[in-house]
Image: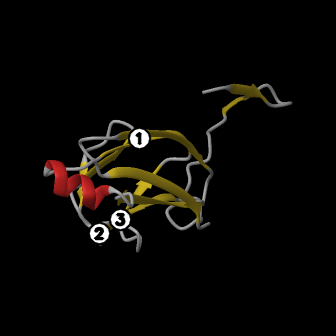
Amino acid sequence: MPETTSGLGTRTRLQAAEPDAGDGLDCSVTLSRDHPRDCGLRQVYARIDDGAWLTFVHGQSTTIEVKPGAHILKVDNTLFRKRLAFTIEPGEHLEFSILNYARWWTAGVVGAFGWAPIFLSVRKTSLQ
């Protein structure tokens, strides 16, 4: 910690202000999979930085407390992966909408081959 000398020759230690729980500087991130266009198929796995992997099915959401600064959100539906870098400011609340969606031709491909890709999309919204 830095030290300063006052005019009287005494040394005092400067301490960084620790944010209090009630000071409004808490940061949170909400991950949700409740978009109306979500096809409702397959699970989606998500994590922030090196945190635990969370599993989402259609209709689920969760809010995670994070520290201010730069973070990385990783999302995986076992076929497609997304990696989004984001920065969160003190007191900010971000929401990421996770979406598994099918294309117009998906039903035809399923009929012909018995499977089709489910695509992955992630959208960020600031809720402050």
**Rendered location of residue 53, percent (x, y):** 25, 46
- Badge 1 vs badge 3, beta-carbon distance below 8 Å: no
- Badge 1 vs badge 2, beta-carbon distance below 8 Å: no
**Residue type, mark 1 in image:** Lys
Reading the image, the residue beneath label 3 is 33
Reading the image, the residue beneath label 1 is 82
Q: Residue at x 31, y 42 (%)?
A: 51
Quadrant of the image for the N terminus? top right
In-front residue for pair 97/128 = 97
- Badge 2 vs badge 3, beta-carbon distance below 8 Å: yes
Q: Residue at x 29, y 72 (%)?
A: 59
**Number of the label disc, if any, that sits on residue 60:** 2
Tell me the distance, in whole angstroms, between the alpha carbons under discs 1 and 2: 19 Å
**Residue type, mark 3 in image:** Arg
Q: Secondary structure at mark 2?
A: loop
Q: Is residue 66 left or right of residue 15?
A: left
In-front residue for pair 125/107 = 107
Q: 10 Å neighbourhood of mark 1: few (<14), some, or many (≥20)? A: few
**Rendered location of residue 34, percent (x, y):** 37, 71
In the image as oriented, which residue stretches furthest toward the right?
A: 7
Find residue 110 and report its image quarter: bottom left
Decide: is 92 above or below 16.
Answer: below
Disc with the residue nearer the chain's start (2 vs 3): 3
Disc with the residue nearer the chain's start (1 vs 2): 2
**Rendered location of residue 43, percent (x, y):** 22, 56
